[in-house]
Amino acid sequence: MGIIVQKFGGTSVADSEKILSAARKAVAAQEQGNQVVMVVSAMGKNTDMLVDLAQQINTRPPAREMDMLLSTGEQVSVALMAMAIHSLGAQAVSLTGAQIGIRTDSSHTRARIQSIPTDRMRQLLDENKIVIAAGFQGIDENFNITTLGRGGSDLTAVALAAVLKADACEIYTDVDGVYTTDPRILPDARKVSQISYDEMLELASLGAGVLHSRSVEFAKRYGVTIHVRHSFSEAPGSLVVAESESPTQAVGGAAVTKNESLVSIKDIPDQPGTSLTIFEKIANENITVDMIVQNIGLDGKANISFTVLDDDLAVTQDAVRKALDHLGSGQLECRQDVSKVSVVGLGMAQQTGVADHMFRTLAAAGVNIQMITTSEIKISVLVERERAEESLRLVHDAFSLQTAPPDAQTKDIGGSTESDIAEVASDLVGMEGLRVDDVLLDESQGRITISQIPDRPGVAAHVFENIAAENIFVDMIVQSDGSDGQASLSFTVPRNQLDAAFRVAESLLKDMDGAIATSSLEVAKLSIAGIGMRSHTGVAIRSFQSLAGEGINVEMVNTSEVRINLVIDGNAAEQGLQALSSAFADVLQKKATESNTP
Ligand code: ASP
Ligand code: MG
């Protein structure tokens, strides 16, 4: 007995038959003694149709009016759903976002939820009514209708589950759960019994997820268990919770982003603030940059490579050209024949031998790795686009993702929403604001760099197999794009293993025509960890700005959904930590709690 939130996506309410079938699920849940809140999307492709209609009238429609228009799709669905419930002999009341009082900021077409009152919903539930909430919409302080971004009904469902402290948040969709990779690309993909928020966030942002990224961030923030399941089946689906499926498994999922473009900028001045100038220009265009690799050339000039989605390439090129004009030097090269293949897993943070296994798998098939970046829970490589799907399959096989791990676990669903309303209410930045949990300094690692590595398959595999053979734990890895023979490979290891790692690197140089190895004890790793690190734009920029402001050069960077890692000169460790802490003071949870206590 408790509150159940059931969300039905567009395909699950595409026609009257399907609406009735969804209504039966809700009535059944009520008959089992639950209070039921339904969240519904627009029918079928209705939202797309409305977008199209707007385009026919105005190719640049005002965002406010887009929201006014798009919110009608869900309004149709909730009314019909309420009628369906009544036809089954139960009672229901439909509510728009505004009628519930879902308050958002005013960024039309991608508004963020700030607060949700529960009184009206609770009263209706206590009167034994099924509450039918329109997904994807809210209202700002001036009573303007807002929408939460495409796919935002998932977010409405999770948010309602959080504020109502629901016992379950069921997302009904046209797939029966979360898969180890996109089953449309790889039929071998396996449905998982459960997946962690962080893994799901990485996969969702890689385009492999069935859930909206912000809904997963929201669920993580407020401890909502999400149950993804098929609309037309009774079978259990997949749970999205804090823990991964298997406590011992290194990799839980894999993904390919085919439409990545590689942007390489060579011969820019090696000074703090150079990359900032470039990234600021790109961020001003609202473009998210991925797989950032910078390296210091041997001649005092620096190179930067990163990836953006194909659709963003043209605008990115313009922005970079402007930045280069400003800097007075640098060459730009772009390639579109590349794709990103990633593996994700909470378990890899505790295990060695994950990266080299991935690299060896690709090398054995003759796939050249053009770029590498790793975070605590993700390894991404850039490969030739023509071999991207094959690479995904190889990697998926290599980590046996098609087979359920022997120690697979599934969390109990009942009573599992751990949301703390006090916390919800005191969250001054709004329920979806950027939240930084920690700014961390790690001075326990050193860095090895191998410059001028050859651009051919197997180099990274060779290096990391030999490192692993010495039982050296590798943390961050970055490899820059090697198309001009100037690629370099940097990685960090514990300081007490730096000498051993350097000896390994040196012993490998003879196989790497002309490569040069260097090592440095004097590096510091700074990390910013939290929620919304990538869904909020400008977080990486803010950290670059604060370091550049102190004249600190960033030697290695990695960004993920939950963390930004920056390796800097070890002599500037404390200064860098201070700079980052003050740059994020407004959203840093620790400080906020400290200043709240008298
Ligand atoms: N109807 C909206 C969309 O198509 C919201 C949703 O379905 O989640 O994006
Ligand atoms: Mg959806």
Image (spheres, helix red, strand yellow):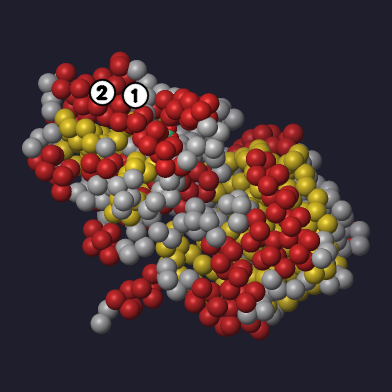
Alpha-carbon span between mark 2 and mark 1: 10 Å
Circle 1 crowding by C-alpha within 10 Å: few under 14, some 14–19, many from 20: many
In front: 507, or 331?
331
In what quadrant of the picture does the C terminus appear?
bottom left
In front: 169, or 76?
76
Is there a contact, CB below 8 Å, between mark 2 and mark 1? yes
Circle 2 crowding by C-alpha within 10 Å: few under 14, some 14–19, many from 20: some
Instruction: Judge whether 432 appears above or below 41 on screen.
Output: below
* Three-letter amino acid code at the position of disc 2: Leu
In front: 152, or 203?
152
Instruction: Judge whether 410 appears above or below 462 on screen.
Output: above
Q: Residue at (66%, 58%) from the top-left corner? A: 281
* Relative side of 556 to 530, left or right: right
Circle 1 sits on which residue? Answer: 13
Instruction: Judge whether 282 appears above or below 314 on screen.
Output: below
Q: Residue furthest top?
A: 17
Q: Residue at (49%, 56%) from the top-left corner? A: 536
Circle 2 sits on which residue? Answer: 80
* Relative side of 249 to 504, left or right: left
Q: Residue furthest right?
A: 513
